[in-house]
């Protein structure tokens, strides 16, 4: 279906071009949003694009499947389903137009990142998800990775409580960095939300001030004109902020999106730890088995319970040899296991480290973009305010010489 | 609005009071003119019928005064003696003639000296609008200042500065501008500026002033039956419930509306200030989280230039906000408060006049009736002068405030645009 080295992203223009509200029943609260994914071949612009409708939960299933199947990959994250770090006027309703739009942008980004990833874009489920109406679910279901991974999750968490942190510095650093970055980003988001609240109140007060000026202007002769004009400009000053703050909300969504990558990194590192631990466990069992066998073979069992038992029951040589043989084959198996596990760990490490580098470049690019838009937005807010205040100032300076 | 008779009567009264104060002021042309008019006119009982000429000649005189004298108050200094400690302010009076400075006097005055002058003028000119003084340094005021400066003070608590010292200093510097406004307004009033006690206050050495202060207060031009009732009748809420005579009821209504509006403005301005302080706190908080982020990036040798750029921009905003906040209170809210006090004084004057007019009607005494006419005209002239001054001052006040905001936002735009430009060009710092 695809060539070896080109990703879906290279071949297709992928975008979520539309959203639609659908009702699963008559009740209004049962409505859900479907997203229209449109894929268009880059090489052949005249071709009709391939369109499929997907729900948010479909994205979720796909992602879970990818996480389970490619444990070393930092799978791109989905936008959060719950809305957090809000301020008083932010859109709380999950299905409001603004929220859906913000989610659409992030889902689009998710698809693009998945498709730009060499491993993930080659997955048949991803391809059918994008290019065929049905069928992707079947692939996901038959792969059985989902159920397994789900059952694994609690054991993962339990193990984490006891086992030691990895010795590998690269993973350790990545893990710590992910934790720190996550904390820091959430602090930023919290602080921003509080600030947005304050700024909104501040502008609201200016609305009141504008009203006062307008009322006052009717009872003043000389000041009247100036007051009225200033009141008008104050009103427009106060009115402009909400829209900007919503724009800022959207930007903060991107930042939150970046923060959720931290969890992915953490889970990749945890998997690495899990594998390393499994490996070492198997090595210890192998070691135990070896010593047991050696002890049995050399007949030094005077001190063991087994030796006592065998003496009591009158063991003959034949059964003894048979036992040693089974033990040997056991050991061989274990050796094989160990080797396999070792290979798996090494493979995983190699891939995961490549992934981490991949993520870092991506993160930097994204952060630059987010921070730059943030600065530009702030500049625009300041510019709008500057314009308003210049007008207000000018309404008080007509014919007057300022001090 | 003015009219020859009442103006004459007023000048007449001024002449009398001047004589009473040993005629220290130099009589001017207007004075003598009015005296002539006074003798040739009879008193009418209906004040409203008078047709009044403009007050051009007198206003010229005002402008001349304004051009010639400039007053500065500054340099608060603390004096400590065994018994008490007090602050003196340097009062500089510069006299100009055709733009050339011909004289300068420097005197140091205590706040109590200002109070003395104000009380003296209040008694002597019950129907003139005398500028309010800034509030005396009391505990409540001090607490208020601390509360106002809560944000600044709180940060200072963290170590570097002595909190009370700092707030005291801030307070006295603030009071300077209030005292300066007080003197400036007195000088701008043609009647009061030539009062000997004002001249004494501006020029005399400490001993002369103190000996003047020892003397009993001059008697008010009002009738003794009014002054004898209480030691300071004008500070009492007088004429409560009595209808204001018709010719001033409109003025009174206007003043009331203005006062209401100014009160609202003051309240709103304080609210905006506290909003601003809240923003400032949150902005600082945001900055600190950005700094945390920067630290994290540095700790793991990540590329820190991105966050650093934003940090720097945010830092600039916080600093600018700090500056803006520092000036808001002194330069904006306190002047508004001053105007609120001012409207209160105007109302007091009107009330005094109302009571006086009641007395006149009761007494039906011709001499008192003359005084009422004088009072009416003094009030009319002063209200007009005061309205003009108020318009200009409010205009300038709003203008300078908006200008501050313009400066602030200009700096913000620059800071953010620079940051954005820095972020748009990929740097290879790693």
Image (tube, coloured by chain):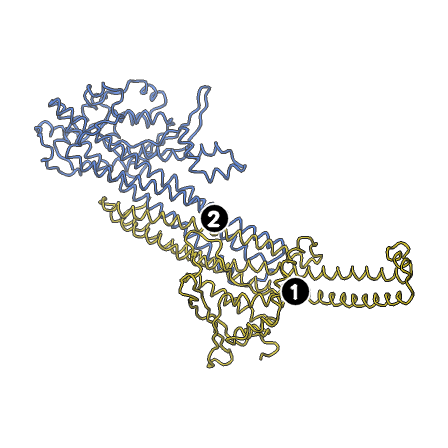
Chain colours: A yellow, B blue
Residue at (50%, 39%) from the top-left corner? B155
Q: Is residue A88 left or right of residue A263?
A: left
Are there few (<14), some (14-19), or many (20+) residues within 10 Å of tag 2? Answer: many
Q: Which residue is mark 1?
A: A352
Q: Is residue A61 above or below residue A235?
A: below
Could you tell me if residue B33 is visible in this image? no
Asked whether the viewer can see residue B39, the reply is yes
| Residue A9 rendering spot, x and y as whole percentages | 54, 73
Nearest to the observer: residue A304 or residue B267 = A304
**What is the crowding at mark 1: few (fewer than 14 residues within 10 Å), some, or many (at least 20)?**
many
Q: Give how far across and how far down residue A276 sits, in percent.
A: 71, 61
**Residue A10 is drawn in which quadrant?**
bottom right
Near-viewer residue (A233 or B81): A233
**Residue B95: x and y, percent?**
31, 34
Residue at 81 percent across and 65 percent down: it is A331
Q: Residue at x 62, y 60 (%)?
A: A153
Compute the Cα span from label 1 to label 2.
39 Å
Q: Write down the residue under mark 2.
A: B283
């Amino acid at each position: 279906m695809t060539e070896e080295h080109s990703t879906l992203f290279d071949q297709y223009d992928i975008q979520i071009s539309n959203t639609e509200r659908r009702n699963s029943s008559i009740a209004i609260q049962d409505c859900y949003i479907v997203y229209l994914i449109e894929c268009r071949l880059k090489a052949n612009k005249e071709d009709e694009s391939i369109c499929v409708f997907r729900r948010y939960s479909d994205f979720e299933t796909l992602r879970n499947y990818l996480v389970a199947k490619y444990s070393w990959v930092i799978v791109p994250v989905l936008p959060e389903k719950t809305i957090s770090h809000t301020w008083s006027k932010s859109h709380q309703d999950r299905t409001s137009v603004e929220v859906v739009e913000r989610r659409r942008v992030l889902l689009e980004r998710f698809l693009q990142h998945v498709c730009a990833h060499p491993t993930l874009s080659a997955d048949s489920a991803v391809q059918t998800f994008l290019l065929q109406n049905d069928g992707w679910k079947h692939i996901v279901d038959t792969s059985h990775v989902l159920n397994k991974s789900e059952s694994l999750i609690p054991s993962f968490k339990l193990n984490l409580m006891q086992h030691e942190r990895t010795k590998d510095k690269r993973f350790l650093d990545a893990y710590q960095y992910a934790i720190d970055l996550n904390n820091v980003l959430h602090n930023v988001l919290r602080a921003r939300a509080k600030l947005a609240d304050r700024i909104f109140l501040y502008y609201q007060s200016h609305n009141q001030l504008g009203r006062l000026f307008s009322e006052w202007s009717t009872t003043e002769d000389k000041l009247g004109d100036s007051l009225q004009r200033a009141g008008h400009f104050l009103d427009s000053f106060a009115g402009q902020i909400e829209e900007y703050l919503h724009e800022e909300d959207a930007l903060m969504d991107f930042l939150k999106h970046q923060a959720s990558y931290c969890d992915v990194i953490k889970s990749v590192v945890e998997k690495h730890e899990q594998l390393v631990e499994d490996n070492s466990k198997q090595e210890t069992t192998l070691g135990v088995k070896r010593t047991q066998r050696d002890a049995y073979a050399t007949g030094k069992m005077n001190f063991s319970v087994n030796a006592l038992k065998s003496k009591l029951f009158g063991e003959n040589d034949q059964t003894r040899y048979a036992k040693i043989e089974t033990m040997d084959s056991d050991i061989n198996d274990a050796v094989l296991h160990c080797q396999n596990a070792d290979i798996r760990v090494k493979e995983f490490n190699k891939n995961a480290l490549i992934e981490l580098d991949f993520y870092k470049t991506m993160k930097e690019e994204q952060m630059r973009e987010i921070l730059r838009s943030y600065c530009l937005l702030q500049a625009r807010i300041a510019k709008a305010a500057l314009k308003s205040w210049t007008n207000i100032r000018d309404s008080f300076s007509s014919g007057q010489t300022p001090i | 609005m003015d009219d020859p008779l009442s103006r004459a009567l007023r000048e007449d009264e001024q002449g009398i009071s001047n004589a009473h104060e040993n005629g220290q002021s130099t009589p001017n042309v207007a004075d003598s003119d009015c005296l002539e008019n006074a003798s040739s006119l009879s008193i009418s009982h209906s004040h409203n019928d008078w047709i009044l000429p403009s007050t051009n000649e007198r206003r010229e005189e005002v402008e001349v005064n304004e051009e010639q004298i400039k007053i500065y108050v500054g340099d608060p200094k603390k004096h400590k003696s065994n018994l008490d400690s007090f602050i003196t302010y340097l009062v500089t009076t510069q006299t100009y003639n055709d733009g050339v400075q011909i004289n300068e006097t420097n005197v140091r005055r205590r706040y109590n000296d200002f109070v003395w002058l104000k009380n003296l003028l209040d008694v002597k000119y019950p129907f003139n609008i005398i500028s309010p003084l800034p509030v005396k340094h009391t505990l409540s005021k001090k607490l208020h200042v601390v509360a106002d400066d809560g944000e600044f003070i709180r940060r200072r608590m963290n170590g570097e500065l002595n909190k009370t010292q700092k707030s005291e200093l801030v307070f006295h510097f603030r009071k300077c501008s209030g005292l300066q406004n007080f003197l400036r307004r007195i000088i701008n009033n043609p009647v009061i500026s030539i009062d000997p006690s004002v001249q004494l206050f501006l020029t005399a050495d400490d001993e002369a002033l103190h000996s003047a202060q020892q003397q009993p207060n001059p008697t008010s031009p009002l009738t003794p039956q009014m002054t004898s009732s209480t030691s300071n009748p004008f500070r009492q809420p007088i004429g409560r419930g009595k209808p204001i005579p018709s010719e001033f009821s409109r003025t009174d209504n206007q003043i009331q509306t203005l006062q209401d509006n100014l009160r609202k403005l003051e309240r709103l301005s304080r609210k905006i200030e506290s909003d601003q302080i809240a923003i400032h706190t949150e902005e600082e908080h945001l900055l600190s989280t950005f700094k945390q982020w920067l630290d994290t990036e540095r700790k793991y040798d990540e590329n820190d230039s991105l966050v650093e750029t934003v940090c720097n921009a945010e830092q600039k905003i916080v600093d600018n906000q700090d500056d803006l906040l520092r000036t808001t209170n002194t330069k904006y809210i306190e002047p508004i408060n001053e105007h609120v006090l001012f409207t209160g004084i105007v109302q007091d004057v009107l009330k005094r006049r109302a009571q006086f007019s009641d007395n006149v009607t009761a007494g039906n005494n011709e001499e008192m009736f003359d005084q009422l006419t004088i009072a009416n005209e003094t009030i009319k002239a002063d209200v007009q002068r005061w309205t003009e001054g108020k318009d200009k001052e409010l205009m300038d006040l709003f203008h300078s405030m908006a200008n501050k905001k313009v400066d602030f936002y200009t700096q913000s735009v620059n800071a953010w645009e620079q940051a954005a430009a820095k972020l748009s060009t990929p740097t290879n710092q790693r």
